[in-house]
Image: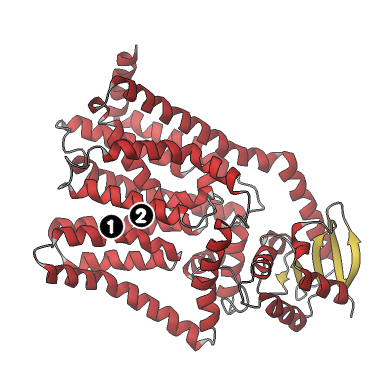
């Protein structure tokens, strides 16, 4: 029975028309929850900061979030192209997902034949490429990994694969400018998210292995790879220095994130156990696959593709687990190497005992099934349930504020995220658009004086309305200096079920 199913699958995948129809169908089924992702998401944080910047504001001075500048630049570009239409945003982000799928397909065609060098037949190598593409299309589009699609991990996939392609092409012909190009793409990763720089380390390690006998060549190529990263850093340092915002840039890009990681490991951000369990639905089976991947280390020690994939997997786990908060979308950036590990083991199953072959296949199937179920949960949240109810009330509060203010009035929503500014069509009275940043900095004593800066912003802008929770036992009321400021300078204007609108007294 299993043999017949296997033969039928191979025949189907070897038919070009049927294969690409399967790829398209898998894409639609896996992407559907991302297309229907809840409106209230991190999407609007990246968008809002990018919007303010591209409209002439000062990044990290007029709008702030703890990320390097490129994610806001890309989102600002999206704003200039499509305004605030979530439909157009998701069409655009869908097109970008096609780009990294195409790039990964090219990676598969280069790496798989060398990775599976023990698999002698060309047919098996081509089959592995097709299976790898289908698996990648499925996993990279699940909503727990994509989130809303406009974050650092989704954009980073494109530049990660471009970095790999440039490097693999360099290994083929040794042309120095391809190493330069690989370093350039690595620099983009770094200024999307600082810890993405770890994804470039395997290139340096393989470069060292290739040039152990000619160490000068290693340093030469290493310098070529590092030059774009240094130059790119210099551009941003000069830009923010010229704007008088160098310290703001350093805090947002590096210093806050370091403190943030410490808070995450202390369990001060969210329920790490639940996040870890959701994440481990995929990652735990993949870790088991990686153990089987390492069983061939001795036989493949001279296989640079094998070593590169293994090192990239370790680097990817280091940057994702290193943050300490275990959000599923952190793992989007390492989907390419996850798939490569799975494909390698899957097409070497014959090396293992029969019981392990069966268990690994069952484990992978259960993992994919559960991962898909988790993805669909976001679609359910968007259509019904508590998330839908909260969204409707949020819109009601935003409509009230919009109807009772002018386009030039500033408002502040003392809640997580930036969706309120999109719904109300009003700008924030503070550069800190999310209450979570203020609470975290105050509660864990980061030492950046965000509360003081927030109050200065609010007074400068004469912020007309503050939207906050009615329940004084809610989390954000633990930031006492801000609550005292609200009580002193604002009074109740309108009460809703969960929220209340405060109006400036003067």
* SS assignment at label 1: helix
* SS assignment at label 2: helix
Percent x, y of residue 226: 28, 72
Most foreground residue, 293 or 491: 293
Percent x, y of residue 104: 33, 47
Q: Hey, which residue is sitting farthest left in the picture?
A: 213
Tell whether 261 sits left or right of 357.
right
Most foreground residue, 291 or 64: 291
Tell whether 123 sits left or right of 6.
left
Tell whether 215 sits left or right of 223.
left
Report the residue marked by disc 1: 202
Q: Is residue 349 above or below residue 314?
A: above
The residue at the point 47 percent across, 32 percent down is 367
Mark 2, other Cα within 10 Å: few <14 / some 14–19 / many ≥20 = many
Percent x, y of residue 188: 39, 66
Q: Is residue 28 above or below residue 156?
A: above
Disc 2 to disc 1, C-alpha distance: 8 Å
Report the residue marked by disc 2: 315
The answer to whether the residue labelled 2 contacts the one labelled 1, judged by CB atoms less than 8 Å apart, is: yes
Image disc number at residue 452: none
Most foreground residue, 190 or 381: 190
Mark 2 and mark 1 lie on one chain; the one further toward the N terminus is 1
């Amino acid at each position: 029975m299993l043999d017949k199913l296997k033969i039928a699958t191979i025949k189907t995948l070897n038919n070009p028309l049927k294969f690409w129809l399967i790829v398209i169908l898998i894409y639609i089924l896996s992407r559907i929850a991302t297309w229907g992702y809840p409106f209230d998401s991190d999407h609007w944080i990246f968008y809002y900061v990018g919007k303010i910047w591209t409209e002439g504001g000062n990044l990290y001075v007029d709008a702030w979030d703890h990320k390097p500048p490129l994610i806001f630049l890309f989102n600002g570009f999206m704003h200039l192209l499509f305004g605030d239409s979530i439909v157009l945003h998701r069409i655009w982000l869908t097109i970008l997902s096609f780009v990294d799928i195409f790039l990964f397909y090219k990676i598969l065609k280069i790496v798989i034949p060398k990775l599976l060098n023990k698999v002698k037949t060309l047919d098996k190598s081509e089959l592995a490429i097709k299976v790898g593409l289908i698996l990648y299309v499925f996993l990279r589009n699940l909503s727990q990994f994509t989130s809303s699609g406009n974050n650092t991990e989704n954009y980073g996939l494109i530049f990660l694969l471009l970095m790999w392609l440039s490097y693999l092409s360099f290994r083929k012909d040794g042309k120095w400018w391809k190493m330069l190009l690989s370093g350039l793409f690595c620099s983009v990763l770094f200024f999307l998210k600082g810890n993405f720089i770890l994804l470039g380390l395997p290139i340096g390690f393989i470069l060292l292995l290739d040039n152990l006998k000619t160490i000068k060549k290693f340093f030469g190529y290493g310098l070529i790879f590092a030059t774009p990263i240094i130059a790119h850093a210099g551009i941003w340092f000069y830009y923010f220095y010229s704007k008088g915002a160098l310290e703001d840039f350093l805090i947002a890009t590096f210093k806050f994130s370091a403190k943030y990681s410490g808070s995450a490991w202390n369990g001060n951000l969210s329920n790490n156990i639940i996040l870890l369990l959701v994440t481990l639905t995929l990652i735990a089976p993949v870790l088991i696959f990686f153990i089987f991947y390492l069983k061939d280390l001795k036989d493949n020690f001279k296989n640079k593709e094998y070593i590169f994939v293994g090192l990239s997997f370790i680097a990817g786990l280091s940057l994702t687990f290193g943050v300490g908060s275990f959000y599923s979308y952190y793992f989007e950036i390492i989907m390419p190497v996850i798939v490569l590990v799975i494909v390698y083991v899957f097409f070497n199953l014959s090396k293992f005992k029969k019981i392990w072959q069966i268990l690994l296949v069952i484990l992978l199937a259960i993992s994919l099934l559960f991962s898909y179920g988790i993805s669909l949960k976001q679609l359910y949240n968007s259509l019904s349930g508590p998330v839908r109810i909260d969204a409707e009330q949020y819109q009601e509060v935003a409509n009230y504020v919009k109807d009772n203010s002018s386009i030039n009035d500033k408002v502040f929503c003392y809640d997580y995220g930036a969706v309120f500014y999109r719904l109300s069509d009003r700008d924030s009275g503070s550069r800190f658009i999310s209450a979570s940043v203020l609470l975290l900095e105050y509660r864990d004593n980061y030492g950046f004086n965000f509360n003081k800066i927030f109050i200065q912003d609010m007074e400068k802008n004469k912020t007309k309305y503050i939207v906050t929770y009615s329940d004084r036992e809610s989390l954000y009321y633990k930031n006492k200096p801000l609550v005292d400021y609200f009580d002193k300078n604002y009074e109740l204007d309108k009460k809703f079920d969960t929220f209340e609108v405060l109006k400036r007294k003067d």
